[in-house]
Image (cartoon, rainbow, N blue to C red):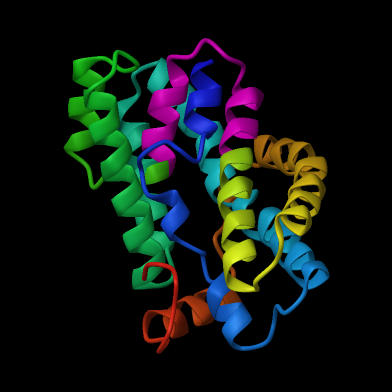
Amino acid sequence: MQLMWLASPALPIGGFSYSECLEAAVDTARVATESGATEWLLDQLHLSLARGDLAVLAKAVPAWQRADHARIAELNAWVLQTRESSELRAQAEQMGRSLLEWLRNHTTARTEQIDTLAQLQPTYPLAFALAASACQATLRDCLLTFAFGWAENMVQAAIKSVPLGQSAGQRILSALTAEIPRAVDHALSLADSERQAFSPMLAILSAQHEVQYSRLFRS
């Protein structure tokens, strides 16, 4: 139940307000159809999320469980340093702070854990890892939850920005759900030296989105 709660788009951390460059891809005609949105998000899942945030999460959950504060700080710093635009970094920080505030009002995390995270510039993957670490779920289930929450938010972004109907959105979500286990298994297999956040077109589109004349999503 705790993992379902964390995956819910109703969790008040603001994830629904970001398109992670998808809106800029639509504005520049890189994504214009249901099939185009499906391909874009599948690529983002495997090339960006699996090799970056999911790989961080795979190391961060056990770090919280064994109270390895140095490792937690190292992983959080990696997330901050590898966000390739001010928009992407602002999203990681804002959602991290919001989830930290949510944790303060629940019994999911201990006070000393919350204080440890608060002393950093908390990012969303590290805050999520803290919330998930107390759920007594498997590490793989924690990553599946994170990925599904991302997928739901991104499908909603596609529905609004392309735009698409709800049935198209469900088909895209079905395609993502079928691929999430493979992305998670890839993330779990990565060593620190194999983790990366190299997505140059996402970085370019994110920078463009920051100054896009008309937009629905935050930058």
Residue drawn at (32%, 62%) of the image: 90
Residue 17 is left or right of residue 164, and the answer is left
The quadrant the C terminus occupies is: bottom left
Q: Nearer the viewer, residue 119 or 43?
A: 43
Q: Please tell me in which quadrant of the rendered image residue 73 appears.
A: top left
Residue drawn at (47%, 76%) of the image: 206
Looking at the picture, does residue 128 appear above or below residue 157? above
Q: Position of residue 185 (x, y in %)?
A: 74, 36
Q: Position of residue 189 (x, y in %)?
A: 70, 37
Looking at the picture, does residue 97 appear above or below residue 197? above
Residue drawn at (28%, 18%) of the image: 106
Q: Position of residue 105 (x, y in %)?
A: 23, 22
Residues rendered magenta in the picture: 125-146
Looking at the picture, does residue 92 appear above or below residue 164? above
Q: Position of residue 65 (x, y in %)?
A: 42, 16
Q: Nearer the viewer, residue 70 or 174?
A: 174
Residue 174 is left or right of residue 90, and the answer is right
Q: Residue furthest top?
A: 136
Residue drawn at (28%, 31%) of the image: 102
- Residue 134 falls within the magenta-colored stretch: yes
